[in-house]
Image (cartoon, rainbow, N blue to C red):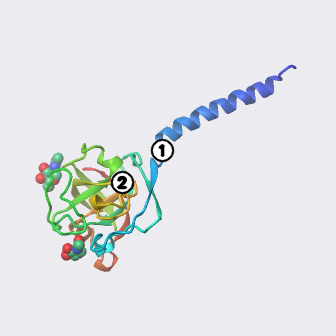
Amino acid sequence: MKISSSSAVCFFISLLLATNLSILEAKTCKPSGKLRGKKPPPGQCNPENNSDCCKDGKLYTTYKCSPRVSGRTKALLTINSFEKGGDGGAPSECDNKYHSDNTPVVALSTGWFNNMRRCFQNITIHGNGRSVNAMVVDECDSTAGCDSEHDYQPPCPNNIVDASKAVWKALKVPKDDWGELKIHWSEA
Ligand SMILES: *[C@@H]1O[C@H](CO)[C@@H](O)[C@H](O)[C@H]1NC(C)=O
Ligand SMILES: *[C@@H]1O[C@H](CO)[C@@H](O)[C@H](O)[C@H]1NC(C)=O
């Protein structure tokens, strides 16, 4: 059978498209897996300040990557305590220390934290029509959660800037609205 030249062209175009698509996919961040939530044992998971606690049987998506960093990286700002006894749990990963919530410090999702490579770097957070510089001191773990190490909190989404209250104050977000805010950030 003779293959018409137009169907041959069609074939090559679809081949080209498929190759391009797989290149695109490699650039976007896809989930690395799922984990099933366990109910926090009594006294575990400090639900203060909007911290989320794992729900029994619920499936949570995990990520080893985060969206690509640009000069204007979109993210979700959340609130965290970096103090001893706060909802952040363990000391910060970068220096194994606690930090005052009156200093502008943040934890970044695993992909952006980039194996400690962003430790002590400053990022500029733009939100609520203002901007503030904050230092990266911790990881918001997107790869694991719902265990004692993570205070029975779910894995972090892959686009989180988890900030001390000093950051929220500097952005002049009214206290009642502290919790979640769409922002963008850049390297300072
Ligand atoms: C919750 O936030 C308040 C003030 O914003 C802070 O004083 C307190 O330590 C936080 N609690 C926890 C458990 O992080
Ligand atoms: C980040 O900012 C803090 C406070 O302004 C400063 O002490 C620190 O040196 C900065 N870090 C880097 C890597 O520039």
Q: Which is more toward the observer, 1 or 72?
A: 1
Q: SS for tag 1?
A: loop
Tell which quarter ligand 1 is in. Answer: bottom left
Q: Identify the amino acid type marked 2.
A: Ala
Q: CA distance from mark 2 to mark 1?
A: 20 Å
Location of residue 44 by image quarter: bottom left
Q: Identify the amino acid type marked 1.
A: Thr
* Residue highlighted by disc 2: 144
**Which residue appears at 63% of the width and 34% of the height?**
17
Near mark 2 (Cα within 10 A), the count class, few <14, some 14-19 or many ≥20, is many
When the figure is inspected, residue 42 is found, relative to residue 138, above or below; the finding is: below
Near mark 1 (Cα within 10 A), the count class, few <14, some 14-19 or many ≥20, is few
Q: Residue 93's x, y, as percent?
A: 21, 52
* Residue 137 left/right relative to 35: left
When the figure is inspected, residue 8 is found, relative to residue 38, above or below; the finding is: above
N-terminal of the two: label 2 or label 1? 1
Q: Residue 138's x, y, as percent?
A: 23, 54
* Residue highlighted by disc 1: 28
For disc 2, does the CB lie below 8 Å from ligand 1?
no
Contact between marks 2 and 1 (CB within 8 A): the answer is no
When the figure is inspected, residue 19 is found, relative to residue 175, above or below; the finding is: above
Q: SS for tag 2?
A: loop
Q: Residue 61's x, y, as percent?
A: 45, 55
